[in-house]
């Protein structure tokens, strides 16, 4: 499988399932099917590097009685990749350390948990790590072997029995592999069979061989698990998004429907109220100019204009209160004018003032006028804050759903490719 394909899958899935970064990286390794990887894990100076050197049969990793291994070291031997990891210690846990440990955790098929016998019982940190390894093993089928190291440093058999018993109780679920790297080296270099036997390495090697033989099966199980979990998570996510989307779309539709119905009713109602005003006075006198002498008197023109104004104001109040009830109040920011008081939807649609009967008739008396009012108010309804926020929310979920579908497809392609190989 091409690494581009794997990287594409990571690019598509990771943004949708950010909590799966580690699982994706692990899946990446599983589908690339590299050689088996064995790593050591444990506190510093517990003999991890020495152990690996004896397992490999030569000094591939550096050993010292101070804190020695600080970056991940890596050797290929007998078809197996051996990883030497830094020791775990809170006081010296630098950033590099953490990266190295994460990498070891990510890459390994088999973990050798190393604890030096002379230290006695496991401390809290080791217990926590062992617990994590146990949980991970139950979930992913990755294996951990417990190695009780440096047993030659114990005074006698009695002490050894005592410590083995105490540690076994703490490390329940793990078989103890008691070893001495020093004895193994001596036996190996001096050709001493008894020393080799006493080093515990033959038994550890047998346990390791059995674990290595189980790797293909463990990897298949872990691969299926990771695909299964991520597919399931994406499926659940998509179902939730689809449901939310349906609900929001329905809300949007119902709101629009309700608004349009209500608006039509208001326009019809005010039109009905204006109609008698338009017909009450016969000839339109609004255009009859007033003369200087009419300044204090009531003229036909003045009366006409007053009636028009009252009828118009009533219509405006009725429509305005309906609009306010639906959040249609101010013009969208892009349409604002310098005069603050003009930035209302009412003025944008109705105009600044209506003085004449013919204006009222055009607006409310004729079907085309009522249609225009309906259209324009509906336009501003869609531009209102609430409606825009709703539309935006729908667009966001549509985008998220699109991304989740893409992630599902990428994972499917990866899985199909993996099965074919
Ligand atoms: N007596 C005895 N000493 C050992 C044994 N294994 C390792 N040592 C010594 O213990 C010290 C630490 O060994 P390392 O293998 O470097 O330990 P490590 O766990 O890799 O240490 P860091 O890399 O610092 O985390 C060295 O001085 C080794 O010689 C053993 O089986 N018996
Ligand atoms: Mg080391």
Image (tube, rainbow, N blue to C red):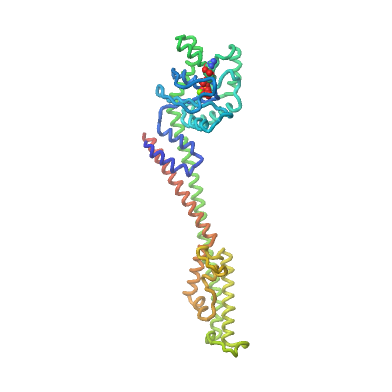
- On the question of residue 176 being in view, the answer is no
Against 376, residue 122 (above or below) is above
Residue that sits furthest to the right in the current view: 296
Residue 401: x %, y % from top left: 47, 49
Residue 101: x %, y % from top left: 51, 30
Residue that sits furthest to the bottom in the current view: 293
Against 247, residue 185 (above or below) is above
Against 25, residue 15 (above or below) is below
- Residue situated in front as seen by the camera: 3 or 136: 3
Residue located 57% across and 27% down the image: 89
Residue 354: x %, y % from top left: 54, 77
- On the question of residue 155 being in view, the answer is yes
- Count how many numbered circles sit on residues in the image: 0
- Residue situated in front as seen by the camera: 55 or 91: 91
Q: Which quadrant would the C terminus be assigned to in this image? A: top left
Q: Quadrant of residue 416?
A: top left
Residue 267: x %, y % from top left: 53, 72
């Amino acid at each position: 499988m091409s690494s581009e394909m794997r990287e594409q899958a990571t690019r598509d899935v990771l943004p949708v399932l950010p909590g799966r970064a580690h699982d994706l990286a692990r899946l990446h390794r599983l589908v690339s099917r590299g050689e088996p990887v064995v790593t050591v894990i444990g506190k510093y100076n517990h003999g991890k590097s020495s152990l690996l050197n004896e397992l490999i049969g030569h000094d591939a990793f550096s050993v010292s009685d101070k804190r020695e291994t600080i970056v991940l070291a890596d050797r290929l031997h007998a078809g197996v990749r051996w990883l030497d990891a830094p020791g775990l210690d809170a006081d010296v846990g630098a950033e590099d350390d953490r990266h190295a440990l994460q990498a070891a955790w990510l890459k390994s098929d088999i973990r050798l948990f190393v604890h030096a016998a002379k230290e006695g019982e496991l401390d809290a940190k080791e217990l926590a790590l062992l617990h994590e390894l146990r949980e991970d093993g139950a979930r992913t089928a990755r294996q951990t072997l417990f190695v009780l190291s440096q047993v030659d440093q114990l005074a006698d058999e009695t002490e050894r029995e005592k410590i083995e018993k105490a540690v076994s109780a703490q490390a329940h679920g793990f078989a103890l592999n008691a070893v001495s790297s020093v004895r193994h080296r001596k036996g190996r270099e001096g050709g001493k069979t008894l020393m080799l036997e006493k080093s515990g390495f033959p038994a550890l090697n047998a346990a390791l061989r059995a674990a290595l033989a189980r790797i293909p099966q463990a990897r298949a199980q872990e691969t299926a698990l990771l695909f299964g979990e991520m597919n399931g998570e994406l499926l659940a996510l998509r179902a939730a998004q689809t449901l939310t989307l349906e609900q929001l779309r329905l809300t949007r539709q119902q709101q629009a429907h309700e608004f349009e119905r209500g608006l039509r009713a208001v326009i019809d109602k005010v039109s009905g109220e204006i109609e008698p005003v338009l017909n009450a006075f016969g000839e339109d006198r609004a255009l009859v100019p007033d003369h200087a002498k009419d300044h204090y008197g009531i003229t036909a023109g003045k009366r006409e204009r007053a009636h028009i104004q009252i009828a118009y104001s009533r219509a405006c109040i009725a429509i305005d209160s309906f609009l306010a009830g639906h959040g249609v109040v101010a013009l969208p920011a892009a349409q604002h004018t310098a005069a603050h008081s003009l930035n209302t939807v009412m003025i944008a649609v109705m105009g600044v003032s209506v003085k004449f009967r013919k204006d009222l008739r055009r607006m409310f008396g004729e079907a085309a006028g009522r249609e225009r009012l309906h259209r324009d108010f509906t336009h501003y309804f869609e531009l209102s804050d609430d409606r825009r926020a709703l539309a935006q929310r729908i667009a966001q979920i549509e985008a998220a759903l699109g991304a989740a579908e893409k992630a599902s497809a990428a994972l499917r392609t990866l899985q199909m490719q993996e099965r074919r190989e």
